[in-house]
Every structure is written in structure tokens, then in C-alpha cells.
Amino acid sequence: MELLARAGKDAAWSSSRARRWNANACGIVESVRAVNITIIRKLLAPELLTQINARLGNAKWLDGLMTAGPTAARVKRNLQLEPGPEAQELSELVKKALLANDKFPPVALPRRITPPLISRYEVGMEYGAHTDDAVRSRDGIRTDLAATLFLSEPESYDGGELVVNNNAVKLAAGDLVLYPATTVHRVAPVTRGVRLAAVMWIQSLVRSQEQREVLLALHGAIARLGDHPVTVSVEAVQQNLLRMWAEP
Ligand code: NI
């Protein structure tokens, strides 16, 4: 299954190609497909990260089960920041950083974003394998993409990796990972220290991951073309595909 993990790591592989490859490698048809994971480094500037972590040091935490859907409730063992003005203010800071980042919009094509939920895992806590609720009951947001913003330095805790299909992700504090919410994923048990993270979900203008990938490829091509005579034609293709696929 090492091959399967490699397929998952290579975001450039199309899902159909990876499916064929997995079938060949394992001798069976696998239902697991390559996952498109995007990492955005340094989403939070160091000063902002320090400020957020200082405020979280004195925060009150509640059982994470209070925001778990029925599926997640069986496997969710963590703490969450107590709702209130402090949590709201910290959520706004994270959301603002996300919207100001230049890599996030072309990947996610965000239509709606949930308020970030700040979670804390102490030794022995974990979030077992689950899939996210498709539609959040409290605000009707369809969860196309999930995002985890790491707030603790990786050296300060053991375990606590976010595992999306077969891909383990553990990033520097201030880095964000964006992945399809359609996946089965989990947070591995923390065995030392404390893991702080902010998680949020995005309803995209374009529901299909494959269509978003096409639009992202066009976005990259346009950036590379710059002031080329064909740029306007490629932009027309990009906008017309978005017109066909967008659910504003
Ligand atoms: Ni989840």
C-alpha cells in the first residue's frame, strides 16, 4: 500500500489515473482515490500567531462533543474554545487572514465559510475516523472543503497528525491545509504536549473537486502567460466554465 500513499501525495495525478494505478498496483479495484491536498504556508504572520496563542493560553475550553454531528460524536475526543466574544474575535482574525491570502481563493473558490472552530487536544485526545456532515444544520453551509490551521509548533507535541485517507499532515504553526470534506479523515491521538488548531469548512462556488481543479489549472496558466496575446482567450474559457459551473 506504499504505492497508494504515494498516489495520495502527488496532487498532480488525476483521480481516474490514480484509480487505475491503484488497481494495477494492488491487484484489486480500490475505492480510495488520490486526494487533492493544498498546503498554504505561513497563513498567519508570526506576530498574529503569537497574539492568538497568548490569548488561547487563558481561554476556557469545553467538551468538543457539543459541536459534533451524530456520526462524529462516536469518535470525537477533544476540547473546544468556549463560545463568546473572545472566541468570535479570534475566529474573525483567522477568517480575515484566510481571505487576505492570495493562494486560498483560486483553490477554494469560496462562497461561504464557517466561523473557525478552535480546538485543543491534550494527551490521550483524538478525533477518530469520520466524514464531515455534508450540510451544517446551524447555518445550512454545504461542506465542500475542510481546512485545518495549525496553531502549535510540531515539536511541542507528539501524535496529533491530521490523516486524510492515507496522508498524514502535521504542519508548522501558522500553516493551513485544505482538503476535500468528502474524505474520511481523523486526528491521531496526542501522546505528548498540547495540539491547538482552528478548523473551518468552505462551501465553494463550484461543488465538484474535479471542476475546481480545471479552473485552478487555468488560473495557473493565465498567471504564467502574463501579457501574452492569447491570455484574453484563456481568460474567456476560464470565466465561461465558471459561468457554467458556479452555484452563486
Ligand atoms: Ni472532520
Image (cartoon, grey):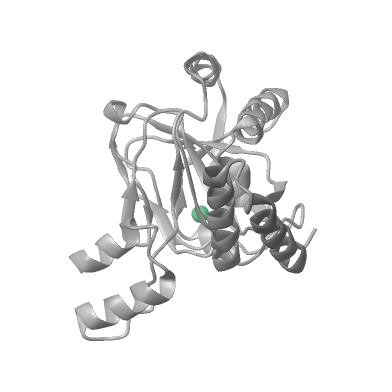
Q: Is residue 178 visible?
A: yes
Q: From this view, report whether residue 68 is shown above or below residue 103.
A: below
Task: Give the left or right position of residue 212, taking residue 239 as reference.
Answer: left
Q: Would you say 105 lies left or right of 139 here?
A: left
| Residue plotted at (54% across, 17% down) | 48
Q: Quadrant of residue 91?
A: top right
Please report the residue visible at 31 percent of the width from the left and 31 percent of the height from the top.
Answer: 154
Left or right of residue 69, residue 126 in this image: left
Residue 181 x, y percent position in the rendering: 54, 59
Identify which residue, 180 or 215, lies in the foreground: 215
| Relative vertical location of residue 195 with respect to residue 21 in this rendering, above or below | above
The answer to whether residue 152 is above or below residue 138 is above
Q: Position of residue 68 (x, y in %)?
A: 58, 53
Q: Residue furthest front?
A: 229
Name which quarter of the figure residue 196 lies in: top left
Q: Quadrant of the C terminus?
A: bottom right
Looking at the picture, tell me which residue is in the foreground, 213 or 135: 213
Q: Quadrant of the N terminus?
A: bottom left
Which residue is rendered at x = 33% and y = 58% of the image? 10
Please state the total of marks drawn on the protein image.
Answer: 0
Quadrant of the rendered structure where residue 25 is?
bottom left
| Residue 128 makes an appearance in the image | no
Q: Is residue 82 left or right of residue 51?
A: right
Residue furthest bottom in the image: 28
